[in-house]
Image (tube, rainbow, N blue to C red):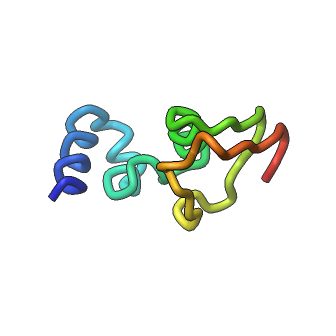
Amino acid sequence: MNAILEAMLTLIKHPVRSFKHPRSILEPNRWCNEVFVEYLRSKGAKIGKDTRFISPRNCDVDINRAQYITIGNNCC
């Protein structure tokens, strides 16, 4: 139920992004690399410049321990 509510709020708050990127409704923090990196940083992860995840949707990250994640600059 909580995921459905979050998806509805995303659609209301960001209607243009939601229609341009339908994945953003179902996976609000994993639909693109930039959003995923910012999400991890907001949870305490230290991620360097120009670091990217090839497929954020398929990355398994323990968000409860994000403060222990450190990734350098220019990593993939």
Q: Position of residue 60 (x, y in %)?
A: 56, 64
Q: Residue at x 68, y 59 (%)?
A: 54
Q: Which residue is at 77% across, 32% downward?
A: 49
| Image side of residue 57 versus residue 10, left or right | right
Depth order, front residue of 62/14? 62
Q: Residue furthest bottom?
A: 58
Q: Is residue 16 left or right of residue 53?
A: left
Q: Residue at x 33, y 58 (%)?
A: 26
Determine which quarter of the picture holds residue 9.
Answer: top left
Name the spot of residue 2 as percent of width and height, x first. Answer: 19, 53
Q: Which quadrant would the N terminus be assigned to in this image?
A: bottom left
Q: Nearer the viewer, residue 1 or 44?
A: 44
Circle count? 0
Q: Position of residue 46 (x, y in %)?
A: 68, 35
Q: Left or right of 51: which side holds 36?
A: left
At horizontal 83% and vertical 37% (from top left) the residue drawn is 73
Position of residue 60 relative to residue 14, above or below, is: below
Q: Quadrant of residue 70?
A: top right
Can you give x and y, in whole percent of width and height, for residue 71 in the image?
A: 76, 44
